[in-house]
Image: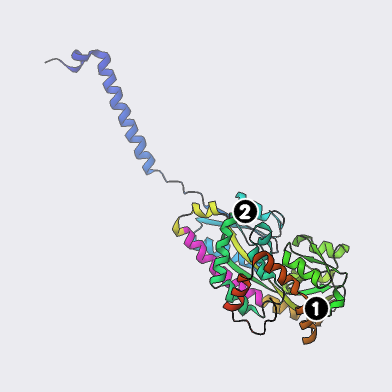
Amino acid sequence: MSSIADMHGFKGFNWINRRRLAWSACLLLAGAALAAPQKAPAPVLIRFSHVVAHDTPKGQMALRFKALVQARSGGRLRVEVYPDSQLYGDDDEMEALQLGAVEMLAPSLSKFGAVGVPEFEVFDLPFLFHDLAQVRCVTQGPTGRQLLERLSRQQMVGLGFLDNGFKQMSAGQPVQNLQDFRGLRLRVQASRVLTAQMRSLGAYPVVLPFDETQRALASGVADGAENPLSNFLTQHLDAVQRDVTLTSHGYLGYAVVSNPRFWASLDDADRSLLTLALNDALDEGNRLSARMNQQALATLRESSGVRLHALSAAQRSAMRRAVQPAYDDFERRVGRALLRQVQRDCLFQDQDLG
């Protein structure tokens, strides 16, 4: 019987051996690869940008969210928080989110009107809410969910609401009567409701980013501003504003939003983890907001550099009547249904506006 070498020649014999050796080498390399330690996948990065300091309700909420995500994901999801407009400010953070330059933001509710969701300006209506219970009836109920869903029209995923509290008026003088507002340049956010509010009171609205407020007040570009007391202190406005009038005339809150492409790229388990962690962080942030505003009020009562002023019932009623044009403008642009829904859902009592 002829050998393989006789049948194929010496060259064929070498080819067969080389092929066998190659297969053996492949098997050895595959075994080595399986035996070698596998490199862990890179963590999913979530850049969370906002415009206020760490020691604010929003700043603390973002840090709590970061810690919860780190702990619950074992580091597989990583949140990096950028406060104080380090990445983006009031003027460009929304566009940055829509373009995917950041994954999460917590803009003030006043800012959504300027990007095509004017329904959010209902929260800016002066003297609409009596207390935080009424606010949360909206934000944590069906109306709030509907508002968050409308953000999808502008390439945003709405995830939840956060309180900052009720706004007070600061200036270089008390602003208790309508004549006190006349001619004052008062800083506001870019909201048509807020500009209409100031005009109806006889003041000139000055639209400025939040991080420019202190400088504007110090330089005289603006004469006053409206802020929750926690913002008033964390932004050091007490260094440039002598008088704070406790008007509690309007609510300031935030909506946490995400980039839709990023949100869709997550699997169901990760979306659930982030949602639950955010809800826990928002609950804690809301409790902190109420506590910080109470602490800020106590601090200002003891301050020798700031004078606090209260409104009488008659003064408050006069202001409520004066701001009716802001309601009229909102209803012309957005419609009456949303305002009626908010008032009906929360059983507002004694509401003589709108």
Q: Are marks 1 and 2 in contact (CB under 8 Å)?
A: no
Camera-side residue: 78 or 184? Answer: 184
Q: Looking at the image, is 109 positioned above or below residue 347?
A: above
Between the C-alphas of marks 1 and 2, the distance is 36 Å
Disc 2 element: helix
Pick out the residue farthest to the bottom.
Answer: 313
Which residue is labeled 2 in the image?
Answer: 97
> Residue at the spot x=54%, y=68% of the render?
279
> Label 2 sits on what residue type?
Leu
> Label 1 sits on what residue type?
Thr
* Mark identifier at residue 119: none
> Residue at the spot x=19%, y=14% of the render?
7
Q: Which residues are magenta?
A: 270-290
Q: Residues within 10 Å of mark 2 (few under 14, many from 20)?
A: many
Camera-side residue: 132 or 78? Answer: 132
Q: Looking at the image, is 78 positioned above or below residue 196?
A: above
Image x and y of residue 44, in percent:
52, 52
Q: Looking at the image, is 284 positioned above or below residue 271?
A: below
Tell me which corner region of the image, top left, top right, bottom left or bottom right, holds residue 151.
bottom right
Q: What colour scheme has been applied to the protein in the rendered image?
A: rainbow
Which residue is labeled 1 in the image?
Answer: 245
Magenta run includes residue 284: yes
Camera-side residue: 134 or 277? Answer: 134
Magenta run includes residue 232: no
Image x and y of residue 144, in percent:
57, 69
